Amino acid sequence: MREKILTHLRSHHYHPMKLRRLARFFDVAEEDYGEFRTLVKTMLRDGEIDVGPRGKLVAPREERPEAEAPKPPPARPRKAGVAGRFSLSQRGFGFVTPAANDGPTGGDDLYIGPEDTLGAVTNDQVVAEVRGKSPRGWFGRILEITERGQTRFVGTYHETPTGGIVRPDGGILLQDFAVPDATSAGARPKDKVVFEVLKYALRGEPGEAVITKVLGPRGAPGVDTLSVIHQFDLPHEFAEDVLDVARRAADRLDDAALGDRRDLTGDIILTIDPVDARDFDDAVSLKEDPDGTFTLGVHIADVAHFVRPGEPLDEEARLRGTSVYLPTAVVPMLPEVLSNGVCSLQEGRTRLTKSAFIHFDRDGEPRDVELANTFIRSRKRLTYEQASAALEGKTDGLESWVVDLLKAMERLARVLLERRRRLGYLELDLPEVNLEFNDDGCVVAAHPEDTSFSHRIIEMFMVEANEAVARELDKFQQTYLRRIHPEPDDEAAEDLMHYAKSVGYPLHNPRDRRDLQQLLNAVRGKPEAYGIHLAVLRSLKRAEYSIKKENHFALGSEAYCHFTSPIRRYPDLTIHRLFDALVRGQLEKPTGGPAASPAGSTDREVWRPRGGRHKAKAGPPTDDGATAELAAHCSRTERRAEAAERELTKIKLLEFLEHRIGDTFTGIITGVQQFGVFVENPKLLIDGLVHISNLKDDTYQFDRRRWILVGRRTGRVLRVGSSLEVRIAAINIPRRQLDLEPVEPAVPAKPAHETKKAIRQEKKADRKEKWTKRGPPKAGKKHNRRKRR
């Protein structure tokens, strides 16, 4: 039998097959299968045969016949290529996001089928060929992988009869990797490990990797946090030279630093933060005049005084871009001697700040702004819960001046909110959840996040401060890191319009903030509210950093930047340096006026640095290209931080649900695809997939235009925002998958003929609406033939 197996696997006619199929090929009886399997395992161990992709048996590489390699296809003209970043789905296909908007696809993503990925994984830079366009969009194949996005990953080590393997976490890599050196690295079965890819699986060849670090046993306390930190390559340790610079920088908080600053230690200033906040980078003060006007003071930790450009500390902060707030740990942007020490606006401590004083009229319109370098001493540290209780009359021993200040802050915040609403401010009511952990970092409870108005007070004040600083910088026509939020694109706007109409809420212009406000207000408090709010959120583009002078769509702001969180965001630190140059008088407004040189201009003659002892210390950037690169880098680090937080949160929740297989809950449909629906648990805010094969009450068809699944027999419609009772069927933590199955509905579905009639009427109304915009279709030969008939 050994010789028969070897001869068969070396044959030109052999197609790789798994063990059970090979046994059927040789007509192995069932009672002899155990002995046959033992023989094959012995041959694998001795290297006489090998395992190929998907566990199929093949001859060793050196013994494979030359005829096994397929002949190359005839050369054909290459179509237009697209360079961009690749994203791989867990189902094997992926998309290339073009690096430029002027390519063959016009900036649209390019679909890549599972057989055309060339072994590329998420975040790889690739060059792809555009092969055509279907009704669903452009499609093509990858021609070249120009740069790997990452080569180090996290996975779980396993031992198999053929040797050690690592099974990657997170769905970025979909294949296992052989790791022959696992014992030398000290890895044990089911250990979480960091591994570096030596060779990716390509054209039937298995991948290879080397273990670089063992994180610990899977499930041990803290190991999942370490896994996510390494998975997203988060810099989590500070080099000794960076720590030395931070310690020396902390010594700059002395009497000399207070010399040329405005003394606000006698003012009533307080902080309001979450109960578990570790650093305090913003404080507020407020004066209410008898005529109903207000002067708001927003005081932000002066991190720029301690972090100087070009120092190792600044380079490290720039590299990190942002602090990462994981569910059970924080990866800070700055060492704790600064972030939790001399920069933090702690109660009763003298701290250096940058202050924006904004004067509002009775309608909440900003009339004047004054910027200053200051030092403060916070009188009181409040939590959001304390502030909310005080506003409800539960003072709990708080001083009367604190309560009076909170009430004045509430009055101003409500006036500002009304003004924002008139400008088109979008308020999305989407639930958030707070998780409670035990000492081992495991989820033990979940409860809705506090949505009291005290949160809105601080939010409104910080938005006003960010906008005020951006307006002042625009007066000097400076290139700086703006926070922009583009309006929805054509496809997203059309999808939102059709979805809103399908649930009974016509939307005239999805790009008009007032129309969106009317839609959001119309569904508030109704069952379909969640679906509408979620659909609006998904229609919006991501906010990002840019040097382009663009609006912030969701806020209705024409100029916006991030100024209020320099302890945790590098863009805020860059704004503080410009703030410092402006306050010290190193910048002058251009003599030609705004019309002479628009904001964002590269004409550097509009800058007039003044003399003085601070002349060489700070000033505006001199390279717009470098600032644009910094904006892109900060946007990437922000997205990485958000993805890492979501990843670890999902891991924690899946671990929590792992012991609840079979439990049922009524969830909300958050996504509809051709292969099924995604259903979210309303308490834990984690979603899972109900595959279409598990919808056994009917045969469902996917209507892409309306993003719904429709039952052919019952007419049952599944759409975003609908409720669905489901059961937890399976959990795969390494793949981050939650599989659900439906519980049979207690209420009979709508009759099929009624639903189909409604859909036909809706399609007819859509066609009529298009005719009103573009006119009816012109009568051609087809229409004339119909007339003759």
Image (cartoon, grey):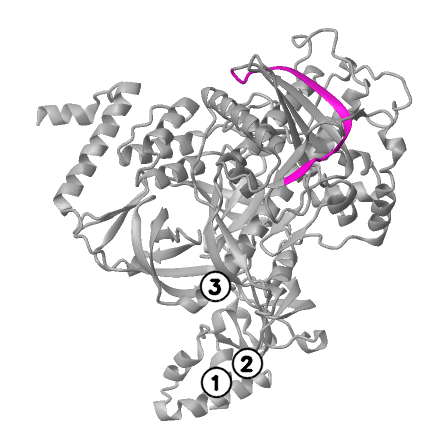
The correct choice, above or below, for 285 with respect to 164 in the image is above
Nearest to the observer: residue 133 or residue 607: 607
Circle 1 residue: 5
Circle 2 residue: 49
* Residue drawn at (51%, 34%) of the image: 391
Left/right of residue 489 with respect to residue 242 in the rendered view: left
Is residue 373 within the magenta segment?
Answer: yes
Front disc: 3 or 1? 3
* Residue drawn at (13%, 47%) of the image: 751
Q: Secondary structure at mark 3?
A: helix
Q: Secondary structure at mark 2?
A: loop
Please indicate, yes or no, whether residue 512 appears anywhere in the rendered image: no
* Residue 269: mark in rendering: none
Q: Earlier along the polypeptide chain: callout 3 or callout 2?
A: 2
Tell me if label 3 and label 1 are in contact, CB under 8 Å: no
Q: Earlier along the polypeptide chain: callout 2 or callout 1?
A: 1
Q: Which residues are magenta?
A: 363-381
* Residue drawn at (69%, 30%) of the image: 299
Circle 3 residue: 656
Residue 683 image offset from top left, x and y in percent: 41, 53
Nearest to the observer: residue 654 or residue 367: 367
Residue at the left extreme, as displayed: 789
Q: CA distance from mark 2 to mark 1?
A: 9 Å
Q: Earlier along the polypeptide chain: callout 3 or callout 1?
A: 1
